[in-house]
Image (cartoon, helix red, strand yellow):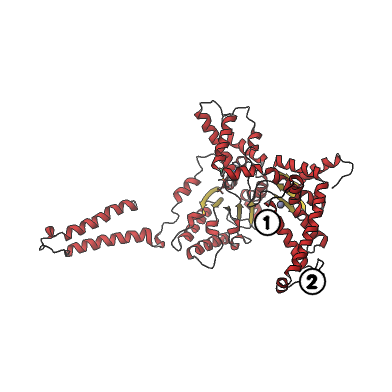
Amino acid sequence: MKKKSLLFILLPSIIFGFFMLTSPGINNKPKGYVGISSSGISIIILITIILLIYFLKYNGSPQFAPVNLKTEKTDKKNDKANEPKIGFKDVAGLDEAKEELEEIIDFLKNPDKYRAMGAKIPKGILLHGPPGTGKTLLARAIAGETNSKFIAASGSEFVEKYVGVGAKRVRALFEKARKEAPSVIFIDEIDAIGAKRTLESNNEKDQTLNQLLIELDGFNNDQTVIVIGATNRIDMLDEALKRPGRFDRNIFIGNPDIKSREEIFKVHIKNKPINPKINISELAKRTHGMSGAHISNIANEAAILAVRNNKKSIDFDDFNNAIEKVIGGLERKNYSIIEKEKRRVSFHEAGHALMGKILSSDLISKISIIPRSQALGYVMYTPNEERFLITKEELFNKIKVMLGGRAAEEVIFGNISTGAKDDLKKANEIAFQMVCEYGMSDLGNRFYEPTLIKNCYDIIDREINKIIDLCYKDTLEKVKLNKELLSKVANVLYEKETLTGEDLNTIIEKYNSTQKVSII
Ligand SMILES: Nc1ncnc2c1ncn2[C@@H]1O[C@H](COP(=O)(O)OP(=O)(O)OP(=O)(O)O)[C@@H](O)[C@H]1O
Ligand SMILES: [Zn+2]
């Protein structure tokens, strides 16, 4: 019986019983007497006891709490028998992530091969990145590719008031996964249980997290179970969770670039009647900064609009209106700013890349104008070689690469923007260390203790200023000298949104072939 219906029957009957038994007419008591007869008392006590037991059983005591209250929902989610199997072909783009997951897939497919070698089996993977980028989809595809059972849960399902309930659910989840192995456990919003523990301890949360750690440690090599956690806030996770043997691999799943957006569109229009004149790359171009979930939403909206207008197939207008609608649902202001500033961000990032190439510091692995956490774009480097010592010249070069973004903005637009905040912070940190820790300024071979730094702040500040100024002047000069190449890189970046190190080399080589003297 449902909790609510029982309450509806029992509560009125108690009240009714009370009034009946205390009513003077019924019990033939003298007028004014409001006492209760002894049989009345026993009935009320009996009903109260029944009520009390009921509430203790279902509400109060954690021992009685049903384990995994949401199994119904989770089971529904997991019961993929009637749904078509999802594989990597349904996940568009995300090539780097897929490549990283190859090994996990191979393990799930051929666990014995790894066991025979005595190899430690990978257990936990964290997928992190903005919402709607395909983390759940990817986890599902791993299960599909390997014919494993997909067992999904959300971190918030384990957050409970009563001590021990969350932990019990974690145990039940892993038990189920072991029973149904090979299996993939997917815990969305893992930060809800895996958040950093603070001094104000919360017994229930701590127990749940501890249970998760115990389960992760408790796997042995015979069990083919992989745990995938997803979060938008990897910085919030407790370090214990990221230790070797637990979630020791993390893969960033970012918003798609223009090519990936095109592929995502293709996945989502596959089963829809589409006007053959539709230019998908144009759709991709118009959805800069959007996630896979937005694109899937657009495809669906476009189909609805086509039905509403009694069309036989979805045409460009439907897509256009759907894009407008989704943009309208996003914070319109933010979105249009991202779009408008795409050109400035392209030049800014190209400025970093250009300086990186000229000064041949660390290898550039990727340049992107797809927003990532706070940054509107970024350049990723792979360190050239394992190094412990860095020369003064190399530190100068690092600062110049960091200032390359601002210099490019100044050279191209004639003004500067707030976009260089993080670059300036990092450049100033290096300059500060050069002055106070490495003895690389005009103040000589000095090391400044914190107390001394306070007292000599003015002269230290002047030295930092000198270093940054010197670097910026040189950076400006180099950017001006290579303005044409900068524009070439920025324009391709604007078009493609991400460039690999190789793409960058190709652009430079092509440019150099048109020059008498090659600059880089
Ligand atoms: N790379 C992709 N290829 C195809 N479809 C995608 C892709 N990324 C997202 N989608 C679409 O967006 C929907 C939502 O994606 P998903 O739930 O996997 O995102 P998520 O990263 O798990 O989001 P959240 O962080 O909000 O849980 C998917 O069901 C799919 O339709
Ligand atoms: Zn920058």
- Which mark's residue is nearer the viewer, 1 or 2? 2
Towards the viewer: 17 or 355 = 355
Q: Secondary structure at mark 2?
A: loop
10 Å crowding of disc 2: few (<14), some (14-19), many (20+): some
Q: Is residue 232 left or right of residue 460?
A: left
The location of residue 202, given as percent across then percent down, is: 49, 65
Q: Is residue 195 above or below residue 131?
A: below
Towards the viewer: 336 or 44 = 336
Q: Furthest residue to the right?
A: 516
Q: Secondary structure at mark 1?
A: loop
10 Å crowding of disc 1: few (<14), some (14-19), many (20+): few
The location of residue 198, given as percent across then percent down, is: 54, 65
Where does ligand 1 appear, by image quarter? Answer: top right
Towards the viewer: 312 or 240 = 312
Q: Taking the image as drawn, is residue 462 in sight?
A: yes
Q: Is residue 329 above or below residue 448?
A: above
Numbered-mark total: 2
Q: Is residue 399 left or right of residue 28?
A: right
Q: Amino acid at mark 1?
A: Met
Q: Is residue 198 above or below residue 283?
A: below
The location of residue 367, given as percent across then percent down, is: 72, 47
Comes first in the chain, label 1 or label 2: 1
Q: Who's the residue at 61% across and 54% down the image?
A: 125
Name the residue tied to disc 1.
117
Towards the viewer: 65 or 236 = 236
Q: Taking the image as drawn, is residue 384 in sight?
A: no
Marker disc for residue 91: none
The location of residue 172, given as percent across then percent down, is: 48, 56
Marker disc for residue 446: 2
